[in-house]
Amino acid sequence: MTPLSAEVRGTLTDAAHAFFILLVACLFAYRTFGYATASPIESDAHQNLRAAYHLVHTGVMGADHLETDKPRPQMRREPVPILAITAFLALHPAFDKPYTIADVAEGPLTKTVKGVNAFWRFLAAVFFMLLCAELFVPRYTAAAWGLAGLALSETFFFLQPAYVDRLMTEIPGAAMLLASSWCAVRFAKKKNSPRAIALGLALGLLALTKAAFFYISIVFVSLLLLMDIIKNRRGGKIGFSNELTGPYLGVMLALSATIAPWMIRNYVEFGTAQITERASEIMGTRVLLVEQPLLGEIYFFTPAWLRKWSVGSLTGYTPTDLLPGGPIGKLPDIKEKHMGIFAQRMQAEKFTGDAEQWRRQMVIRYIAEHPIRYVASIPIFAYKGMGFMQEWSLLFNGLVLLCFFSVFLWALFAGEQILVAAFGLGAGLFAFTSVFTDALVRYNSPMVPLVVISVMWVAAVFFRRLISKNEVFPRYRAKIQSV
């Protein structure tokens, strides 16, 4: 029997690996239907749902709570998750008969519509496995790490009812974050036009899924470019060249082309070219929180069971201080009543213009008048947002985040662009949340899979060290660059 050539064996191996990834992703997606319940769809998820309902029935991504032939257009929510729900409503046979918003939000079709998360979980699983294939070698090792990491990501994030049993943007955000990170790693390995366009397209879709990534992506791409410039200068080459800047220009053009139609639509409808209109509200809420005692914020952001221990004595606060009239009694109500607080202050200032404009001015004015206090609040909000892995264990959260940022920072200063490409968007999300938002735990949750991969990467490094008893990073660096 004639032995197979190396090329044929390679093709068969790739096909087997692709089949394995698709099989794992299908099983991962199928599990979604076991997690969905008939619990009502509320809050932000309800906004996504009714925008999709109006888009299916009227062609307008509307904001109205009730059925209408002419819904008001909305730009409060990002379009990609809404488009996925729209496609699900249009294609699933359960929605062939007439139905209302109430039917899907808190009625007989509620459990069914949550099946759209299976699509996002399928994508997340595919790109999780593909990203592992880029970072771990050989192929069977990458598959094993990918399967283990997917199981951990399932435990810490994907099976949590707060995400899988709702129509929020966190699971879509995680899927697009993994896709973008994979495209970024591929781009870092070989900078050509197809990979540049793929990265720009992925980043654009990510920004249209979670608006914060528009700003994060610009910094991220700039960071990759800076690393290449430094590498060229150290190698005696010209820092800027057409060969270097061309692919990066392609990334930014593809990114811009992806988000441009949505921003043009918003400019036509609302007179403003932005992805969503929530930024001033979120940053305004952040300012309301920063106005309160900083030590009180640490106490309030700490889990209730831990307040009784060292945190209470260190900060000097007790549970009674959180009651109405207490030193930090306003903190528990700010999130729920922030819009009312804004309205009261606008009325006190006799402001009659656009509310969003007033909130922007309030944020800018506060940061200009209290820059040190605002900067001092950043680690406090980082502390608040670090509970996205496990709410019950600050030590566990701290350790895995330390691992994640250690890998990222080592890669950054060592010039390891592949790892920066893999984890840079996740690091940017955590930094953005800590600096510019009220740091709800769910804001950081899309980075859970990347954190898991970083921990596995470190585990693989030290596992190889136990075998080789040689230097840790240089030996493994050669491995990941050879993929």
Image (cartoon, rainbow, N blue to C red):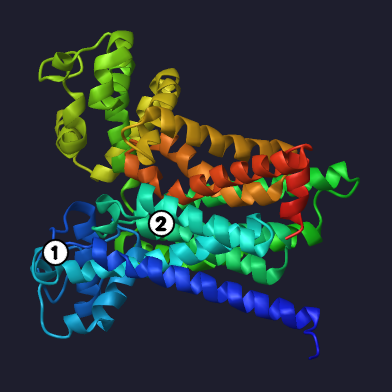
56 vs 353, nearest the viewer: 56
Where does the N terminus fall, quadrant-wise? bottom right
Which three-letter amino acid code belongs to the residue tagged 1?
Ala
**Residue 414 image offset from top left, x and y in percent:** 74, 38
Q: Please give the name of the residue rendered at 70% of the width and 62% of the height, measured from the top-left corner.
A: 247
Residue 427: x %, y % from top left: 53, 42
- Residue tagged by mark 1? 105
Left/right placement of residue 55 relative to residue 132 reads: left
* Left or right: residue 208 compared with residue 164: right
Q: Is residue 2 visible?
A: yes
Q: Residue at x 73, y 43 (%)?
A: 467
The picture places residue 425, in percent across and down from the top left corner, at 53, 48
Q: Earlier in the sequence, mark 1 or mark 2?
A: 1
- On screen, residue 59 versus residue 11, left or right, reads left
Residue, far bottom: 1
Position of 319 relative to 126 (above/below)? above
Few, some or many residues within 10 Å of mark 2 (<14, 14–19, 20+):
many
Give the quadrant of residue 296. Answer: top left
Marker disc for residue 22: none
Image quadrant containing the C terminus: bottom right
Circle 2: element type:
helix
Q: CA distance from mark 1 to mark 2?
A: 22 Å
Tell me if label 1 and label 2 are in contact, CB under 8 Å.
Answer: no
The residue indicated by pointer 2 is 173
Residue 56's quadrant in the figure? bottom left
Name the amino acid type tagged 2: Gly
| Picture residue at 65% right of the left edge, 64% below the top | 139
